[in-house]
Amino acid sequence: MSKAGTLDLASGLGGKIEKNDVLSAVEKYEKYHVYHGGEEEERKANYTDMVNKYYDLVTSFYEYGWGESFHFAPRWKGESLQESIKRHEHFLSLQLGLKPGQKVLDVGCGIGGPLREIARFSSTSVTGLNNNEYQITRGKVLNHIAGVDKTCDFVKADFMNMPFPDNSFDAVYAIEATCHAPDAVGCYKEIYRVLKPGQCFAAYEWCVTESFNTNNQGHQKIKAGIEIGDGLPDIRSTTQCLEALKLAGFEVIWEKDLAVGSPLPWYLPLDKSHFSLNSFRLTAVGRFITKNMVMALEYVGLAPKGSQRVQSFLEKAAECLVDGGRQEIFTPMYFFLARKPHSDRKRGVVV
């Protein structure tokens, strides 16, 4: 799992945004969120712009800190962060029952870390759906390096309106991605449409848990910090996700919050009290070094103005993710496996 270096971080900051426009993009992005007076309905109405700005601004930070796969994972004692991330991806592949030669869709694929791992693990052809041009450009480079560019590709499109015919894929998965959708039912309906009858959709969703109290100001502050730091229009509950799946037409095979019972907490890499040489850049010391490095890069002009602001809201998100995990009011790994029935009840068609 390769990681970007300091020069990659500096050159990638801002993504496809013109370097002179990064600061104004940061300011516009921040205004969408509660911390800066933004409203949920405005975020949902402008989710494409908001999420695109977010990933243009943060992708190089993510790759610098996490590597190619931007997600959490339950973790065993003695297991490195990178090992747990791979195992989390393999688990998804096994739950879907992927077979060599199948055509698979990764909804909201980032720069394609999970796509490449799952394609190699299962010998399948994986298409990554992503609406961010910078991430797709980066993903194509990494696909070529990994040698999967002949069997795996990317499509730039909105997952609320996919450019695929009905019944196109043997399996669909989403890893901490459909949380960006303004409407879970609408997103799941599109996944249902492009999935072949009798086949499965599996996902890890970001959710608030049953312990989240909407009347608790502390809980709401944590939720708002996660939303601004992670480009989310809202954070749904596990119950809402489950209901959305059923409304879209899926049969839910099984579901579980995989954070419950994890031997090591999923938020451990972001916990400032934790130190690890294997994931040094995510530790308190590593993040302090990154903060000062970004400040220096911006000062000398190698990084665009606004880069420190991005690093700042990512740091805030990390703190809120840890708080949300500790209080058990948030999970980034609500897992479900759902099947599209052989009989398409919504259309009255038996396939």
Image: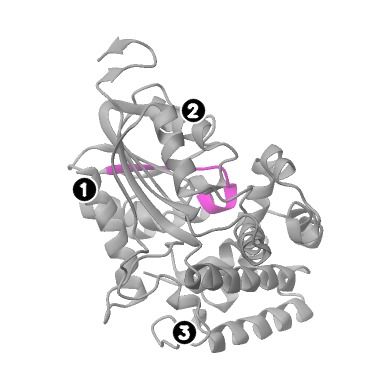
Where residue 245 sits, quadrant-wise, is top left
Task: Identify which amino acid the numbered label 1 is placed on.
Answer: Ser
Packing grade of label 2 (10 A; few <14, some 14-19, many >=20) is some
Task: Identify which amino acid the numbered label 2 is placed on.
Answer: Pro
Q: Is residue 297 magenta?
A: no
The front one of 28 and 345 is 345
Residue picked out by circle 3:
280
Q: Quadrant of the N terminus?
A: bottom left
Residue 190: x %, y % from top left = 46, 29
Is 122 situated above or below 341?
Answer: below
State the count of labels: 3
Mark in the foreground, 1 or 3: 3
Residue 120: x %, y % from top left = 25, 54
The front one of 232 and 210 is 210
Q: How is the image coloured?
A: one colour
Task: Give whichever of discs 1 and 3 has the lower sequence position.
Answer: 1
Q: Is residue 133 magenta?
A: yes
User: Separation of disc 1 and disc 2 at Cα?
Assistant: 24 Å
Q: Please tell me whether mark 1 sits on a helix, a strand or a loop.
A: loop
Residues drawn in magenta: 125-136
Q: Is residue 100 left or right of residue 341?
A: left
Residue picked out by circle 2:
163
The residue sitting at 41% across, 86% down in the picture is 276
Q: Given contact means CB atoms under 8 Å apart, are the residues at marks 2 and 3 in contact?
A: no
Q: Is residue 293 left or right of residue 208?
A: right
Residue picked out by circle 1:
123
Residue 142: x %, y % from top left = 42, 58
> Visible in this render: residue 4?
no
Task: Identify which amino acid the numbered label 3 is placed on.
Answer: Phe
